[in-house]
Amino acid sequence: MASLALTSLLQQLFKRIYRQDKAFDKYQIRFLKKLQTTSTDENENDLFDECVVQLATLPNNLDDKLSEGRLISRHSVTQLQQIDSLSDAIKGRLLEIQNGEIPYTIIEHQVELKELIKIYQRAVIELSKRSMQSGDNNKGDVEFINEELQQVILELDVGEAYVKDLEKLRLSINNESDPFQLPHHCLQVINLIINSTREERSSSRHFLYTLNDSLTEFYLNFAKTLNATEAGFTQQKDTFVSIEKSAKTLQQQSEEAQDIDSLRNYITSYVSEVENVIAEQEKKKEQKFRHKFQGIVRQIKELQSETQSYQKTLKHQTKQLHVDFLTKIPNRAAWSERLDIEITRLKRYDNPLQMAVIDIDNFKSINDNFGHLAGDKVLHAIAQTLQKSVRKTGYIARFGGEEFALLLPEISQQKAQFVLNKLRDRIKAITFRFKEENLIITISVGFTTLVSSDDQDEAFERADAALYQAKAEGKDRVIFIEKTATDDE
């Protein structure tokens, strides 16, 4: 049976991954209870094998999420430092974050995000006061801070009960026209983080109490097992004593027997008595084995049901991690994974591969004139149209903001030019209606042909440069840029 030291070690290890996957959190509690009540080494080994399987299916994307969050935090710091009108105190705090050690743990990352939100709050207050005192218009700076603050909020890791509240706050900040309300919103965000942290601590205490109850149950079951084992030894000893007594009686009767028939009767009686004792013992063992077998069958059925549930949950979570919440198409993380696959295929088979970057023209004016909800509807409609218009081998994803990225494998540059212009015309044909006004929206597209020497960044920079050229030439057009020899230098 599992030792106390082993059980304690497993508890500590499980605590390190607690609240990272809801399905596994429920499983690990059941696992510890089963481990504490298992009666044989074989059952214990089966439990450990089962746990290894569960851990193998647990999605391990924490490093990617933390890396992405750190990049966004550092980007936010860099963007804030570009605002010259901020005070030296805030710039000093930004410099401390920039020169400080990169957060390693989730807690350190959360602490940095909280500090960054406080800096945003202070920056909004300073800009607002300076605007009142000097009469300067800092609307652009406030809007910039507004957008950056929303990006930070999206990276916050709060409890499930607070996710909806945090999203409502993000939308409130998104639609806020009064800069003096932003500090109030920042305080609300900080309060949500504090409440979520308190709930997590409460959940941790509850988990420890549950473990304590499980340990108590383990000790009770262990005591029962010892008593049952001692009773089994006593019963076995009584059986041997009974057989030994019968053997002595047979020996005495054999010595006193006067003829063969009497001796035969004595032996027959002894054998019958021994057979009855053994049969009774086997019957008890059979009943005990049948009871254990039935328990194993129930456990197998429970495990099958749990496995199916875990598989469904895992598929759903994996899908959610790679889908943009607004447009319902693949997100940037999914794009990076797919691009890696396509570049690997390109280097192996040398099949043509085109990459395009698509941007919605004048999208900011849509938000300014009709509101951010209108902008969200435009993003969703265009994303769905792009996804439905791309053939099955193509891959479209939201790269960020109003920008989309598209892969077109196994077609030439000329064919890609035709496809992208067709996409552009299809988007242009959509009529949006906001505030009794019909609106025609266009897109600009830049694309390039990938070569075997390309990596993700190089190819995207070329496509992005083509997009920038399309914008500079008047928008609503498709521009191609080819890799040149100087690009490899």
Image: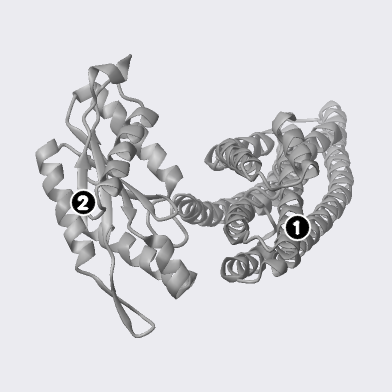
Q: Residue lying furthest top in this view?
A: 489
Q: Nearer the viewer, residue 290 or 444?
A: 444
Q: CA distance from mark 2 to mark 1?
A: 45 Å
Q: Position of residue 385 (x, y in %)?
A: 26, 62
| Mark 2 Cα shell of 10 Å, populated few (<14), some (14-19), many (≥20) | some
State the SS at label 2: loop
Q: Residue lying furthest bottom in this view?
A: 436
State the SS at label 1: helix
Mark found first going from the N terminus, 2 or 1: 1
Q: Nearer the viewer, residue 186 or 225?
A: 186
| Mark 1 Cα shell of 10 Å, populated few (<14), some (14-19), many (≥20) | many
Q: Which residue is mark 2?
A: 477
User: Which dot marks residue 193?
Assistant: 1
* Residue at (78, 40) in percent of width and height: 93
Q: Nearer the viewer, residue 75 or 34?
A: 75
Q: Position of residue 405 (x, y in %)?
A: 33, 46
Q: Residue lying furthest front in this view?
A: 134
Looking at numbered disc 2 in the image, what kind of residue is underneath it?
Arg
- What count of labels does the image hold? 2
